[in-house]
């Protein structure tokens, strides 16, 4: 009799974005007269054309495949050497960070890697995530058995939620070693900690001092830090590390996830990578240290034949001089959108975070509205799709996220509509907080 | 303290193909004068140009990405509806098989799927694989904890190896319910059974009666059949099912893996798919039946944003009228290679299997040679790379695999060189078996 993975049965209802899509579709069906006015600032999906360097690289790679003399079959499981080299040099060594070519592992996106990395870890690791959090970390861990039952108020038993709120600027505090739970029992130190900066969903960036404290905490507890830097290209804060390896000691405890989705506009092209330094260790039950790098390499060679050839060439092209310029222009474009959204929201008197080093603006809902209520109101009255903060965790309740990934015209229209909503007679409940 | 997945530590040394690559590189370094004469018929990697339909589809998709009006960002985790529909219609419904569009799940290749499917299954399933076998099934299961320690003579404890040998035509027999192991203990029925037809490595195809018996066995034991049909396009035997769903009852117990690697020449493009009918069940420890389809869908939506847009369009193009013709021509080309290799080997008096419905010819080594010895001799004397049968399992000892994926000129040269080797004075040990 074949046994099912019963951990899947713990998963609480649908992933956030399908629920948003459902509500938008229902509204569009109910109001076909305004359906085409809907502006989507919910899911963080890029909207602008792929950079020309990547377009050219994909065309050229396709032409290579069309000729038996230049045809490419199976590639290395973790990516072509030239691509890994361009990444290690371009994103790390050129910034003075010690990362070897063979510590770069290409994948079809960091969403996958954030979960797949759990394959080389054992059972019984205690997970810590921020609250609010990108839901994929949690769901993947539930699937791999690193969580208990779903709790009535949201979240899962056995996971340490690192509360992010206004008082800490929506940045995770290092846990106290004496932390206790509601029953007074000591909370065990987490073994695996996901941190995301620039943060999805709050748009905040972690400063150097705080990340230094996290690295020290991980080393002290022999825990692993999973540093999700998918939005690294948007970080303009000189005091906020762009890579975890800027922190001394991180090469012993940290794995970094990067993506080309938001830098090169690769959400449909699909490419990201993981940095796994050879010095990162995990432990057997008997306490023997085991380097994770060979396991991750074996994992890729056994489970994959690497990323599509044309996609790898497109990723590599982003590191050329023209590629850098094109990525810079694309990021600047979205960051100008973010500025317009952030300043627009602030002019309405709304309390905001993010939007300065990230393509997300995190806003407090007006008094009297919870996240989903205000989501519905924005959808129905302003025809603007946002993401309700509660979808990212309990601490996200009372907030919502606006994505800057859209056309300039749409972003400007969103600001206008939010202003109209704020000013409209029948919506006096929308007092500034 | 972060715990490592200790199952990885059970994995025996390197995957087969890296070992072959190592020996070839060592020979090339030792004999640079003949290095460029080496012909690679080892790894089953295609060599010919990508079909024109796929080339055009990739160019067109790239152009769509280059324009914001037609740009594609995140796609559905399990593939675009139009691609899933083309597959379900083209590969199944057009052949009278009942497979719905949403039972097709696109991936970046069936190598990944053969392992990823284990994510939705629980711990404690007993695995059965053929011997010889594609090593990925076994290694992936070891990684997921479905095996015991590596055994001295090869293989892992706790796995049922279905011996394939000359007496059963290298086709797996359904286990007897009374089977006992060496100690006389009853061997438990397997819960998960991988079958591959046309077979890698032996090139044999499973007949309808035998597969019908396997489906009956799986239903009786509530086991799952994993039907790897990566080489389906090469099957010309009217009595050998191309899909497991040709067998009544298979929709209750079978998951089928397909690949475009060998049909459309996608080994570098990367695309495959899994068929998971909604009626396939696995069971909780308490014996409650759970449909796997929603779990697999959730798995994809949480762990992936789908296959690269241009790759999906390339896969879809293979189902057009011109695409079918181009795939047919490509398969015919490799099958003519297989015929030349098979008949060449037979003319030397070598005992062969496969090569008629698969791009692999499976040969018995001459008397006095084990698999790796003969591999080395073919490499050193004929400069031909093959794959030693022992690399696929204990029952592969004494055999070797020749891949038909090569140019016509190379295939003809291989036959000439094998003949020269056979006839050469100093190699009289190479008596026909």
Image (spheres, coloured by chain):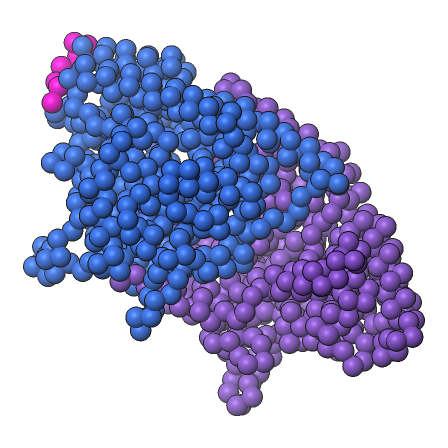
Chain colours: A blue, B purple
Compare residues B114 and A261 and report the one nearer the observer: A261
Residue A408 visible, this orientation: yes
Residue B365 position within the rendered picture, expressed as x and y whole percent measured from the top left? 78, 74
Residue at image position (85%, 79%) is B429
Residue A53 location, quadrant: top right
Q: Residue at x 50, y 59 (%)?
A: A298
Does residue A148 lie above or below A212 as drawn?
A: below
**Magenta highlight on residue A257:** no
Number of residue marks: 0
* x and y, in percent, of residue A74 in the image: 63, 49
Closer to the camera in the image, B178 or A240:
A240
Residue A427 in the magenta stretch? The answer is yes
Query: Principal SS element in the magenta part?
Result: loop
Which residue is depicted at the point 34% across and 62% down?
A: A282
In the image, is A262 to the left or to the right of B178?
Answer: left
Q: Is residue A343 above or below residue A45?
A: above
Q: Is residue A213 left or right of residue A31?
A: left
Instruction: Please provide percent x and percent y for residue A331.
Output: 39, 25
**Quadrant of the rendering where the C terminus of chain A is positioned:** top left
Q: Position of residue A100 (x, y in %)?
A: 45, 49
Residue situated furthest bottom in the rendering = B183
Say if residue B404 shows up in the picture: no
Q: Nearer the viewer, residue B344 or B352?
A: B344
**Up/down of B223 relative to A202, above or below:** below
Image check: B249 left or right of B408? left
Magenta-tinted stretch: A424-433
Q: Quadrant of residue A233?
A: top left
At 69% from the left and 76% from the top, the residue drawn is B397
């Amino acid at each position: 009799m074949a046994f099912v993975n019963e951990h899947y049965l713990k998963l609480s209802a649908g992933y956030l974005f399908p629920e948003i899509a459902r509500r938008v579709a229902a509204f569009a069906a109910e109001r076909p007269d305004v359906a085409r006015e809907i502006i989507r600032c919910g899911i963080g999906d890029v909207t602008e054309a792929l950079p020309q360097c990547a377009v050219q690289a994909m065309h050229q790679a396709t032409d290579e495949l069309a000729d038996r003399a230049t045809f490419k079959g199976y590639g290395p499981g973790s990516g072509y050497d030239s691509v890994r080299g361009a990444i290690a040099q371009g994103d790390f060594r050129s910034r003075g960070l010690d990362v070897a070519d063979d510590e770069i592992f290409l994948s079809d996106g960091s969403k996958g890697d954030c979960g797949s990395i759990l394959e080389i870890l054992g059972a019984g690791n205690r997970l810590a995530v921020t609250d609010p959090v990108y839901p994929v970390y949690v769901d993947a861990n539930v699937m791999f058995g690193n969580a208990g039952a779903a709790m009535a108020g949201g979240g899962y038993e056995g996971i340490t939620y690192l509360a992010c709120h206004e008082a800490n600027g929506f940045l995770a505090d290092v846990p106290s070693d004496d932390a206790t739970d509601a029953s007074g029992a000591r909370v065990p130190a987490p073994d695996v900690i996901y941190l995301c900066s620039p943060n999805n969903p709050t748009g905040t960036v972690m400063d150097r001092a705080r990340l230094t404290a996290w690295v020290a905490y991980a080393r002290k507890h022999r825990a692993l830090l999973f540093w999700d830097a998918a939005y690294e290209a948007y970080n303009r804060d000189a005091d906020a590390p762009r890579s975890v390896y800027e922190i001394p000691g991180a090469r012993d405890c940290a794995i970094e996830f990067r993506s080309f989705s938001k830098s090169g506009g690769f959400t449909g092209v699909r490419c990201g990578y993981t940095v796994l330094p050879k010095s990162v260790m995990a432990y057997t039950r008997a306490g023997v240290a085991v380097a994770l790098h060979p396991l991750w390499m074996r994992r890729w060679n056994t489970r994959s034949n690497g990323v599509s050839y044309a996609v790898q060439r497109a990723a590599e092209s982003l590191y050329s001089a023209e590629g850098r310029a094109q990525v810079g222009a694309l990021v600047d474009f979205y960051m100008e959108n973010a500025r317009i959204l952030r300043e627009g929201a602030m002019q309405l008197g709304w309390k905001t975070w993010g939007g300065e080093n990230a393509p997300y603006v995190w806003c407090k809902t007006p008094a009297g509205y919870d996240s989903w209520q205000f989501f519905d109101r924005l959808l129905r009255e302003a025809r603007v799709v946002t993401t309700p903060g509660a979808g990212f965790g309990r601490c996200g309740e009372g907030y919502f996220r606006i994505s800057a990934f859209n056309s300039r015209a749409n972003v400007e229209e969103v600001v206008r509509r939010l202003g109209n909503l704020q000013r409209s007679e029948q919506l006096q409940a929308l007092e500034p907080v």
